[in-house]
Image (spheres, rainbow, N blue to C red):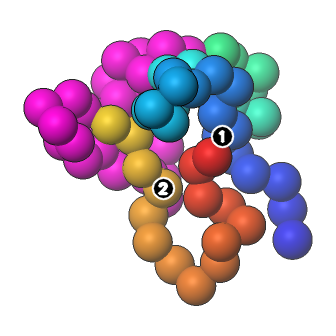
Amino acid sequence: MGRKRVTVTTETDTGRNTRFHDNVTGADMSRAQFVREIERGAYENYHVREINGVKTPCSDPDKSKNNNLG
């Protein structure tokens, strides 16, 4: 199993992921930055959902729990 492409580095007390790290490029991103990058097609295997009115990055579902954001 390879390493996760993106890991969550900060989340709120309620569990909303707010900061992310790209383990390949070394980039640190806010939630809004990561959403923009996903929407422009820079991250395969990730999509954006609107949760409680907030665009939220999500990993695409598959059989593995090892590559989920979190």
- Crowding at dot 2, Cα within 10 Å, few <14 / some 14-19 / many 20+, comes out as some
Which element carries disc 1, helix, strand or loop? strand
Q: Earlier in the sequence, mark 1 or mark 2?
A: 1
* Disc 2: which residue: 59
**Numbered badge on residue 6:** 1
Is there any visible trace of residue 37 in the rendered image? no
Q: Horizontally, is 62 left or right of 49 in the view?
A: right
Q: Nearer the viewer, residue 44 or 49?
A: 49
Instruction: Find out whether the residues at labels 1 and 2 contact each other: C-beta distance under 8 Å.
Output: yes
Residue most extreme to the front:
13
Q: Which residue lies at the image location 32% right of the left edge and 24% below the top edge?
A: 36
Q: Is residue 39 magenta?
A: yes
What residue is at 58 percent from the left and 85 percent from the top? 63
Q: Which residue type carries mark 2?
A: Ser
Residue 70 image offset from top left, x and y in percent: 63, 46
Question: At numbered mark 2, what does the secondary structure look like: helix, strand or loop?
Answer: strand
Looking at the image, residue 55 sits to the left or right of residue 45; the answer is left
Quadrant of the image occupied by residue 16: top left
Residue 29 position by quadrant: top right
Q: Residues within 10 Å of mark 1 (few under 14, many from 20)?
A: many
Q: In percent of the image, x 53 and y 25: which residue is there?
A: 13
Residue 52 seen anywhere in this rendered image of the structure: yes
Does residue 48 sit above or below 34 in this rendering? below
> Residue 10: where, in percent of width, then height?
63, 22
Percent coordinates x, y for residue 12 in the rendering: 51, 23
The N terminus lies in which quarter of the figure? Answer: bottom right
Q: Nearer the viewer, residue 70 or 22?
A: 70
What is the magenta range?
29-55
**Is residue 46 inside the magenta stretch?**
yes
Of the residues shown, which amino acid type is indicated by label 1? Val
Q: Seen from this angle, which residue lies furthest left?
A: 53
